[in-house]
Image (tube, grey):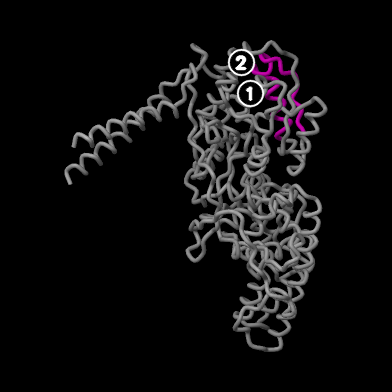
Amino acid sequence: MRRTTRLFTLLCTAILLVSLLQSQIITGQTWPWSGKSEPFPWLDYLASLTPERGVTLRVLTRHESSIQSLTRKLFLESTVAKTMGIVEIQFLYVAAELWPDYIEKAKKLGTPIDVAWGGGPTLFNSLDEYGYLMPLDTQTRPEHYAVLYEVSKIPERIAGAETYKSDPEGRVRWIGASVSSFGFTFNKLILSQYGVPEARSWDDLTRPEYAKYLPARRLIGTADPTMSTSNLRIFEIILQAKGWERGWRTLTLLAANSIIYPGSGDVRDAVIKGDIGIGTTIDFYGYMAMNVNPNCQYIAPQGETIVNSDPIAILKDTKYPVHAAAFVAWVLSEFGGQIVWLNTEINRIPINPKTFDTPEGAKRPDLKSAFEDLLKTSAILFNETLSVNWVNSVMYYFKATLVNAHSDLQATWAQVAQAYLNGKISKEWFNYLIQELGKTVTFTDPLTGKRVEFTLEYAIQVNKKLKEDPSVYQALMTAWESAAREKYTYVLSLLDKALRGEPVPTLTPTTTPPTTPPTPSPTPTPTLTTTPTQTPTETTPTLTPETTSPSLTTPQEGGVSLTLIALVVVLVIVILLLVFLRRK
C-alpha cells in the first residue's frame, strides 16, 4: 500500500511538473523581434523578410459587403499595409460550395488566392481536407511568428469550442477571427399581433400554433442550407443536440412552419421588417436586428447552441506568403481588424478579448457583455469530425426533401396542425402524424438498386460521392425529393383516417404506402460511438475522431517546440519511475 501511495504521489508530481514547465515556457516566450511594443511589434520583422512591394492580396470570403469595405479601408490606411507595401485588397465573394473550384481556377490563371476568410469551420475543415490551407510552421515560414503572436492573445476555447484548428503536429491550420453563437431572432410586435408565443428552444419553432395561418401567413423564416453556411450550421447543431431521428423531426417541422429564404441575410431583414415573426439567425444578425428595430430580440437556445469561431487562413499557393501573414495578423490584432466587428452596422463579437480594452472597444459595452455571456453559454460539444463526414449529405437531403418539396410539406403540415388545433383529431393522433411526417425517407438507392433508409450511416457513406460525382448527386436528389413527396401524401392519407375516427395504429407503419418492400440496413463504413447530449432520452451518434488536435504550442526562438520539450521531460520522468520501482 505504501509503495502504491508513493508511486501515485510521484506520478502526480510529474504531471504537475510538466504543467508548470509548459506554463513557464509559454510565459517566458521570446519572439524574433525585441524591444518592440504594440500595436504591431512584428511589423518591422515581417518587412525585413521580403523586398516585394506594390502587392495586391486576393482574399476569398463569405463576408458581406459592409465587412469587406470597412476592412479594406482600415487596412489600406494602416501602418501594416503601408510598411509592407500592400496597395490593394481584392475581396472575392464566392458561394461556399464553389471555393475549391475557384481556388483551382485562380491557381491555373497564375493569380492564386492568398487568404480565405469567413464561412465557418465546416467550410475551412473541408478546404483543409483538400489540402488548400497552409499550416503555420515557423521552421519553414518565419513570417508565421507574427500570426502566432496574435493567436497567443486568444482564449484556446470559448464555451468549450476551439478557437483555432491544429493538426497532429501541433501546427495551426485556421484561426477564428470572430466568435458567434447560433439561434433565432424574433419580432415581439408581430408575435403579439398574431397571438403566438415567443420561442425559447428549437422545438418551440415546431409548435402547431405557428401553423394557424398557413399557407397564407408564414410566421417563421429559415434559409436554404446550400445558400447559407450559418443556417447549415444551425441545422447541424439541431441534429447533434437531439440525435439523428429526433433532429430530423425537428428540422422537418421547422421547415414546415417556415418560409424558406435564399440566404441568411434575407431571413434577418424579414424579421426586422415584420414579414415574419421569427427567423433562424447567427448571433450578429440578431444584434443587428435589435439595433435597427427595438421590437427584435435574439435568443441562443441554452444547451442547444454552440459557440463558433469564424475562420481565417493563409492558402498554401499564395504568391505573397509574408504579406498574407501580415494581413492575417492584422485581422487578429485588437489594434487592427478586430475593430471592424465593433462597427454598429456589423455588430460581431471579436475573438480577441483585448479589443475591449481599446478606446473603440470601450464604446461597445453591449458587445463586451455579449462576449462575457458567450463565456457562460451552455453549449453542446459540437463534433467537427462528424460534421466533415456528413455535411454534404445533410445539406443536400435538407434541400431535396424540405426545400424542393416544400410546397407539399407545408400543405400537409397545415392540415395536420389545424385539424389538431381545431379539436378534430386527438393528441395521440397528432403525435403519431408528426412522428410519421418527421421520419427520414426510404428510397431506392441509385448506387445499389436496393431500398434503403436515409440513416446516419448512409449519410456518411455517400457524403463524398455527393460532392465529387455529379451523377450520384443528381440521382440522389431526385430519389429523395420523390420519396419525400410520397411521404407527405401518405401522411395526408393517415390524417383522413384520423378525421374519420379510426383508432391510432398500434404499430409504427412505414413512411411510405404498405406496398413498399422492407428496408435493408446499409452497412456502415465508419466506426461510430455515442455521446450523450443535453437530451436525456437520446444520444447523438458521433464519429470517433482520427486524431485529437493538440493545444497551440507557442514557438520558441531557435525552433524548439513546447511539445518536444514536454515529451523529453515525460521520458525522463518515466525512466526515473522505472529506476524507483526496480530499487523497490
Residue 321 % position (x, y): 67, 22
Cα gap from disc 2 to disc 1, whole angstroms: 9 Å
In-image side of 515 versus 181 (left or right): right
* Label pair 2/1, CB-CB below 8 angstroms: yes
Sooner in the amino-acid sequence: mark 2 or mark 1 = 2
Disc 2: CA contacts within 10 A as few (<14), some (14-19) or many (>=20)? many
Front in this rendered view, residue 189 or 512 = 512
Q: Which residues are magenta?
A: 67-92
* Kind of residue at badge 1: Ala
Residue linked to disc 1 = 325
Q: Residue at x 62, y 28 (%)?
A: 331
Nearest the eye: 210 or 443 = 443
* Residue at image location 49% in from the left, 12% down from the top: 34
As drawn, the label of residue 14 is none
User: Left or right: where does residue 278 sit relative to residue 400?
Assistant: left
140 to 396, vertically: above or below = above
> Residue at left 63%, top 72%?
435
Q: Which residue is mark 2?
A: 46
Whole-percent x, y for residue 141 in the image: 60, 20
Task: Determine the main secondary structure of the stretch shown in magenta.
Answer: helix
